[in-house]
Amino acid sequence: MTAVQAVLLVLVAAAGSLVALTRDPLRQAMLTGVFGISLALLFLAFQAPDVALSQIGVGGVALPVMILLALAEVRAHERKRDDE
Amino acid sequence: MTRSARMVVFAVSAAGLATLMAVAFAGLPSFGDYSGRYGRIIAQIAIPDRAATNAVTFTAFDVRGVDTMVEEFIVFAAAIAAVALLRHLRGEPEREARPGDVLRPLTSPAVRVMGAALVGPTVVIALNLVAHGAITPGGGFQGGVVLAAGAVILVAAGGRVRLPPDEPPLLAEIVHGAGAAGFVLLGLAGLVFAGAFLDTTWAGHGTPGMLLSAGSIPLLNVATGLEVSGALIVIAAEFLEQEMLAMEPESS
Amino acid sequence: MTVLTYGVAGWLFLVGLAGIVRSNNVIGVVICLGVVQSSTYVLLLAIGYRTGAKAPILADIPTGTPVVDPVVQALTLTDVVVEATVTAVLLALAVQAHKRFGSLDPDAMTRMRG
Amino acid sequence: MNALAPLIVAVPMLTAALIAVAGRVVGARLAGVLALGATLGCAGLLVAVLVRLHGRIEPVWIGGWHPRDGVALGVSFTLDPLGVGLALFIAVLMALALVYGRGSLDPEPPHVHVLALVFLAGMVGFCLSGDLFNLFVFFELMSVSAFALTAIDVDEGAALEGSLNFAVTNTIGSFLAVIGIALVYARTGALNIAQAGHVFDHGHVDGLVAVALAFIACGFLVKAAVVPFHFWLADAYAVAPAAICIVLAGAMSELGVLGIVRVVFGVFGGPVAAHAEAVRTVLVVAGLATAVLGAVMAYAQDHLKRMLAFVTIGHVGLFLAGVAMLSSAGVGAIAVYVVADGCAKAALFACVGIVQRRLGHVSISALRGAGRDLRWTGAAFVLAAIVSIGLPATGPFLGKALLDDALIHGVGSWAVAIAVGASALTGAVLLSAASCVFLGRGRDEPGAPEYEPLTEPQPSTPVTMWAPVAVLLAAAIAIGVIPGVRHAAHVAGAQATAHGTIVHTVLGDTRAPAVHGSLPAPPAHDWLLSLLTVAIAFALAAYMLRHQRRPLHALRALHSGRVGDYVALLCAGAALFGGAFTLALH
């Protein structure tokens, strides 16, 4: 169990660093999904299935989708402006 | 500040914060050694006091139910805020959806088929999560999130959604308001029938492990499920609508 | 293990802040805020963890089995969902700001200064 | 028995949810009436609770979860005169703001009303809560609704920018607070303020305790906008609608100071009392630095609302200095000062809102002389300014006199000198701005823009806008002469700082002792000092009107409006406070 936790902790730290230090927001959005799911796995290893369930839904689906939608909206707006 | 000055200030401060955290975390119990009495007592009384077999749900919806009520209202306020903030700028020309307009599908056909196939199971899982929150892992928050995820998949996969401009989906808006109101009303029921706000015992005790046990905890979970799913759908719909308005329609 | 766990919590906090400070994109700032917040989840759950104890789902285990702390889990559980919606508010602000300023660079949004 | 206390938050919350469900059906007008009704209902409940409290402390256990064997399980609202009184003040301010905003806030669909009610519930709950994590969730609730209310006018680019800076910095502050709360929980196994405080009374004080104190305090100091956490406030208050500013400037910043009270007398009462001298130094330096910086930056502004925002920052610094005395008299003084000064500041913001409506502009140099016809507004603005400096016999005078007393006893007269200087400068800034806008006096600024309305000027001021100004001014003045105010302040200060009483009342189920007596009436030298401050303010204002404004480039450049800068400085502040508290509790 300890080994699993250790591996997941390292994974979470690495994914979190990648999210924070990546410049391109689109790539950041994708990495957020990875980070969110690795957090959920860590919570599972911490014997917190309730939190893990929440985290999968939020970190794995809701957050990335919202960020992608916001980015798409920004890009669409930019395209529209460039056309004019 | 110039960018480099800013980075220097941050680097020095971060080193300070790191030192502080090291000092503070050194005073924590070793990982895996924690045994606080608060959590221990709660785990002991969950079944005898409320017939709740999920100690986390028991904490979130009963012992510390008011925290959850407030958190639910943060979700509620955030959804209202997203709608209020995303309404159109006054100067921006509004594009009415004309008959015959087909909004560009967001995804490929394969994704759409997959999405549609996923919706049924997602909804079943979500309802299951909400219903059994007091018994097994799950509850209003988790179920609400999964339900909303299902709805978003459906919308994103469907592609051809046509939302009337300026009108967020009325149903989701009503659902999330009703969920928020429901939680407070259940709290008031506790005050009226059991003498304390958010007291859950008025709805009966029940047998541990059965669906209808743990007083009004399952009802509070349903209210939360409505609130969370409704709010997330309202938010997603609002972003989707923005995007579609910004997109030029293809003539079919 | 103690050092690793709490170290990761502290690291996420600082690396998220670093991301915010050096970001040139408001949406990136919002994403990094999520990283900062995740450090609080890791810290809370790590504090409540007990080696060898079970998850606090009492239906599956005999009475009296040691369980990990349910309180920190309840605190974290609700926070996770709240994070999503607060992020939505920030994203909404960012989208509107982009329409106004034509840029997502926070350094370009300085109507108010001095 | 105050079992009905949870209704204080439940009523606005339920009304907000119902408006959201039925808002499109009932229409904006009815929604506005409902919101005002719920706010007044909340205020009425607070009056009832305050009366039945009889000046004591009383826990209300939500869900009926009374402590078992001395262990608090549920969440308590720990009602005390300070918290309930402040909550009542907030509810009244919100009612006035709703009346004031009737004409100016766009109510269709009624999102503003929903958010305002949720905002109210968050602030009031924060005042009442006796549980550390519950305090935090109410704090978050008020933050989220405040971000949205600040940016509710999405047509303003500056509003979006101000709200983003507000949201990012305050959210980081609240994460710092969560880390502190997690540390407290790990050490004490408790989240209830009294319970955690009880454990800290007997435990040893190490780095964990000091950092926990520092991080939680930083979370609240960000909200209070204490240097160097203050940057967001100027950006946000300058752009929020005037009706919202009434509540933001009148009450929200002050709640950060209340949070500090809960921390230093509740949770960490024991360790702080053992190292009172050092903690006092840390907090009083922060408070006075904030007071001076607020006054100086207000002087540098040309934007009326941004100027008032810096005035707000300066006053919060004085409030923090009062709490820093770590005495019953200090907190009692602040109780009076916060309410009286809050009324005066809210009146100032309301006047600027009227100027904005009538003249379509808020830049002082552009408005020079444009306000000559707004006699009543000008008179109200000047009166509010003089009152807020501490005109004798008014509310702020009483608060400030009591504060000066506490400062002299706590740290010495040098602190009073700084406080007087900051007040005089703030007052001078307000007076010179007023004589420029309403009388056309003042220097010719090179490159001052010609007056040209940015928004369509309205020909009249509706009664819903000027009546709240009148009420606020009357209240600010009346607080100075109402009998019983000094007694109430004494009780509020004594109970909020009585660490032992809080612990025993909450955990032991014993009835808290009543407090008798009253803070002393301001002696003659306070009257003289106050008159002197007003005189200095007038003299300084006259000087400012004759001379070019100093540019203060370096200081202003720090207030860059860039969120990255603000976050870097926030980290610096957190590291500084953390280091200072670690040394202080060593």
Image (cartoon, grey):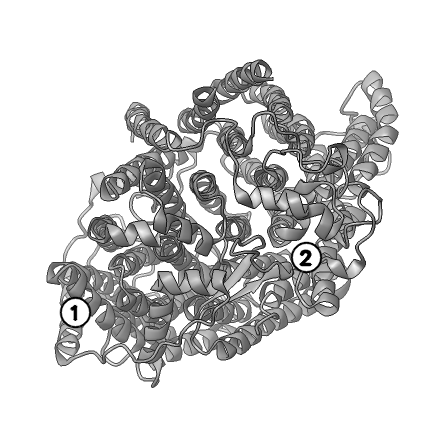
Seen from the viewer's position, the closer of residues D523 and B83 is: D523
SS of the residue under disc 2? loop
Image height of C74 relative to D67, above or below:
above
Residue at position x 58%, y 54% from top? D74
Residue at position x 35%, y 51% from top? D201
Which quarter of the rendered picture does the N terminus of chain D lie within? Answer: bottom right
Q: Is residue C107 visible?
A: yes
SS of the residue under disc 1? helix
Image height of D429 relative to A53, above or below:
below
Question: How many residues crowd around disc 1 within 10 Å: few (fewer than 14), some, or many (20 or more)?
Answer: many
Q: Can residue D449 be seen in this view?
A: no
- Which residue is the site of mark 2? D109
Specify the quadrant of the image occupied by residue D568. Answer: top left
Count the marks: how many? 2
Image height of D504 relative to B88, above or below:
below
Residue type, label 2: Pro
Tell me which chain the residue with mark 2 is part of. D
In the displayed structure, does residue B223 sit left or right of residue A40? right
Specify the quadrant of the image occupied by residue D15. Answer: bottom right
Residue type, label 1: Thr
Seen from the viewer's position, the closer of residues D110 and D417 is: D417
Image coordinates for residue D586, horizontal then vertical, percent:
24, 40
Image coordinates for residue D165, horizontal then vertical, percent:
44, 41
Q: Which residue lies furthest to the bottom in this view?
A: D483
In three-dimensional space, the C-alpha distance between marks 2 and 1, rounded to whole angstroms, equals 47 Å
- Which residue is the site of mark 1? D533
Image coordinates for residue D385, horizontal then vertical, percent:
29, 69
Q: Which of marks 2 and 1 is nearer the N terminus?
A: 2
The mark found on residue D189 in the picture is none
Tell me which chain the residue with mark 1 is part of. D
Image coordinates for residue C87, horizontal then vertical, percent:
58, 37
